[in-house]
Amino acid sequence: MSEELVEFFKALADANRLKIVGLLAQKPYSVEELAALLDLRPSTVSHHLAKLAEVGLVSARADSYYNVYQLDEKALMDKSRSLFSQENLKASVSDVDLDAYDSKVVADYTRKDGSLKTIPAQRKKLEAVLRYVVKAFKAGKRYTEKQVNEILSGYHEDTASLRRELVGFGLMKREGGGGEYWIE
């Protein structure tokens, strides 16, 4: 489906084709009329109309000596709805590594042993590092504050900041002051 999306945008990625679509949205025109309106050669307009027809946006009907082109508004709406559906938009990024940013940030902020060189000050980078750190905890298991600090000390000496940020970003839950900690 992403190839269809690319072809659709390629067809519209030309100022003259966009003008043709805009004109045809108002009423049908012949090649000669469009050529005069856009100050283009009829052969150029025919080329643009062919590109638009390939993706199903325009169609032609014979009217005496001329072909009259019209925008297929239903096809435009159907294609837009189809191309921009959640399913197709997700499919268009299926080969993208969604963890690439986190991986880069973690690589920048960790030593070879996995501990942190420093705790990032930038919110987005801090969140990426916290997603890395929280993997040390088992979902559903309850930890005392002492156990949390022991695990976090393997990442950085400032366990209080890490613990506070994990809770603050909602990556870890806490019960009471100094009570149990867990991840869901």
Image (spheres, rainbow, N blue to C red):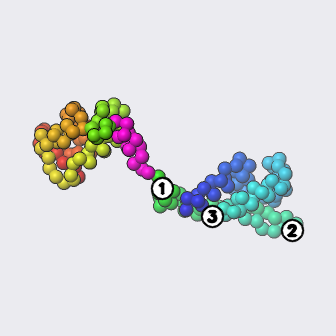
Disc ID at residue 95 = 1
Q: Residue 136's x, y, as percent?
A: 23, 47
The first of marks 1 and 3 along the sequence is 3
Amino acid bearing label 1: Asp
Which is in the foreground here, disc 1 or disc 2? 1
Nearer the observer, 160 or 112: 112
Q: How far apart in space, not on screen, are marks 1 and 3 (Cα)?
A: 31 Å
Which residue appears at 21% of the width and 52% of the height?
138
Q: Look at mark 3 in the image and give the residue it sits on.
A: 74
Q: Residue 132's x, y, as percent?
A: 30, 44
Q: Main secondary structure of the magenta part?
A: helix
Are discs 3 and 2 less than 8 Å apart at CB? no
Disc ID at residue 15 = none
Q: Look at mark 2 in the image and give the residue it sits on.
A: 64
Which is in the foreground here, disc 1 or disc 3? 1
Region in magenta? 97-109
